[in-house]
Image: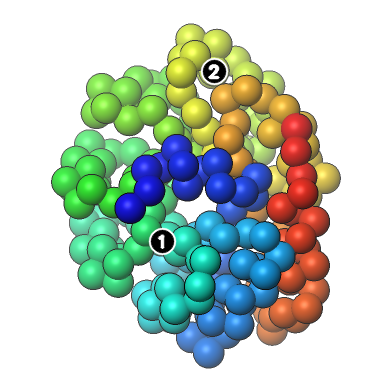
Amino acid sequence: MSDIDSIMRTAPVIPVLEIEEVRQARPLAEALVSGGLRVLEVTLRTPAAIDAIREMKKVEGAIVGAGTVINNAQLDAVVDAKVEFIVSPGLTETLALAALATKVPFLPGVATASDIMRGLDLGLSHFKFFPAMASGGIPALRALTAPFGKVRFCPTGGISESMVPDWLALEAVLCVGGSWVAGKGPPDYVAIAEAARRASRLSG
């Protein structure tokens, strides 16, 4: 199993996916992986999410994780589905300790210096900066990184394709989470594969 640092360095963009129908999961993963985006975050915002994770894990090369994990019951469910990483929108000691105990790579959300300090106290050094744009965007993250030189981030929330290079130009940013690669609605797998190809070539 990879660590969270290796997972975050796999590609410049992690697609954040909200999957409504399980039958869409495998072809969606195939399109994204073929385009060069192997790390896939399936959010637990739909009833189909857990089964979608199981289907996506059948795709060769895919590194499938669960997002929007907010409590221990959800944590147990995604661990049972054998996710390869876990993402939470926030950071609580209860969830963090339980996640760390599973040994599955964990990426909790932070938006403030206090959040980061709480994570550091728990032995964490990699975080999702969320919601990135609503929390002040690049100026806010640049200010936050000043006192935390070794901390690394995946900004997520309100980021468009055109913004990605500016985020990746920050030394503390290893990758960016984005929902634009595969938006809501009936998926166009050809268009998604092309969007993934563009995203996989982005750099700071």
- Residue closer to the observer: 150 or 46: 150
Q: Compared to 146, does 119 lie above or below?
A: below
Q: Amino acid at mark 1?
A: Ala
Measured as percent of width and height from the top left, residue 142 is found at 63, 19
Q: Position of residue 45 (x, y in %)?
A: 46, 68
Horizontal side of residue 94 vs 89, given as left or right: left
| Mark 1 residue element | strand
Is residue 41 toward the left or the right of residue 134 in the image? left
In front here: 97 or 82?
82
**Residue type for callout 2:** Thr
Can you identify the residue that label 1 sits on? 66
Quadrant, the C terminus: top right
The residue sitting at 47% across, 47% down in the picture is 7
Quickly name the residue at label 2.
Answer: 145
**Residue 203, image quadrant:** top right
Question: Based on the displayed image, in which of its 4 quarters is residue 165 positioned?
Answer: top right
Identify the residue at image location x=65%, y=45%: 12
Residue 118 versus residue 103: which sits nearer the camera? 103
- For image coordinates 30% across by 67% down, the residue present is 82
Q: From the viewer's perspective, tell me whether residue 103 is left or right of residue 111.
A: left
